[in-house]
Amino acid sequence: MRPWFPLMTACLAVLSTGCRQDMYDQPRYEPQEASKFFTDGKSDRPILPSVVHRPDPKTEPRDELYDHYNLGIVDGEPAETFPFPIDRTVLDRGRQRYQIYCTPCHGERGDGQGMIVKRGFSPPPPFYGERPPTGKSPAATIYADLREAPVGHFFEVITKGHGAMYSYASRIGVRDRWSIIAYVRALQLSRYATESELPQQDRDQLSKVSR
Ligand code: HEC
């Protein structure tokens, strides 16, 4: 036996006792394991009623509403309709989220002249009217006027990003994306609404302003 061999073995023995696996071996329950801690005898807690099952697209068939709501797609095409009814509450939420997430580039009115565009960022196209022929926006699009774009197109842009615009999927939840789109639709309408389409209350207000 070589003389250093016992010494090395002793060193290894000391080192190996220093190597503890506390994090790995910490007390825990395996899924579905019984437990005396909760009165129902289970270790896992019941799933909340509001939890929505997300099918695995590879193994489980998705129903139509799943694709409409989560992907903005109906029959393989960008959805033309919203997957849930749009009311005042949705619009108010959409306006608030739009003002947080989209105004820096797209502007309060959706004209594409947000604050950071004024400071040099690529200008996005306006949400209404023809796109200006010049401008740095390079990404290909099929819609010359975004008023013609179906709501599913907006959903895809927010979810995946588009050219110079990055994806907002990690920041804006699915329902909020739809709420924002509803508000963008309102912005688009507002630019072209005629006085006769306004409720009486707003018309009175308008005549006071223009006087
Ligand atoms: C950091 C700046 C920025 C923010 C924030 C931003 N966008 Fe954009 N967006 C752009 C730019 C730039 C383009 C043009 C991209 C291109 O053509 O390369 C664009 C393009 C678009 C388009 C047009 C796509 C097409 O077909 O041409 C839509 C719709 C859109 N954005 C919606 C939104 C919405 C909704 C939000 C808020 C959730 C948002 N964007 C937030 C910069 C931004």
Image (cartoon, rainbow, N blue to C red):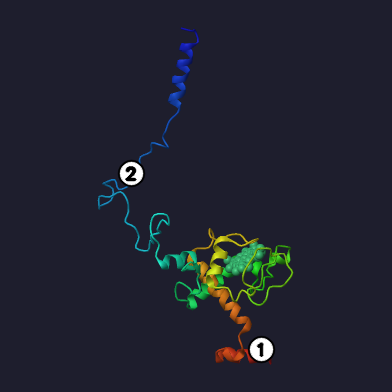
In the image: residue 1, left or right of residue 208:
left
Q: Earlier in the sequence, mark 1 or mark 2?
A: 2
- Amino acid identity at mark 1: Val
- Residue 30, disc: 2
Q: Position of residue 211 (x, y in %)?
A: 69, 92
Disc 1/disc 2 C-alpha distance (Å): 68 Å
Q: Position of residue 174 (x, y in %)?
A: 49, 65
Name the residue beneath numbered marker 1: 209
Of residues 141 and 16, which is closer to you in this image? 141
Q: Which quarter of the picture shows residue 108?
A: bottom right
Q: Is residue 189 visible?
A: yes
Element type at marker 1?
Answer: helix
User: Could you tell me which residue is drawn at 37 percent across and 63 percent down?
Assistant: 50
In the image: residue 57, left or right of residue 151:
left
Q: Which quarter of the picture shows residue 167?
A: bottom right
| Ligand 1 quarter of the rendering | bottom right
- Amino acid identity at mark 2: Glu
Q: Position of residue 184 (x, y in %)?
A: 58, 74
Element type at marker 2?
Answer: loop
Q: Is residue 102 visible?
A: no
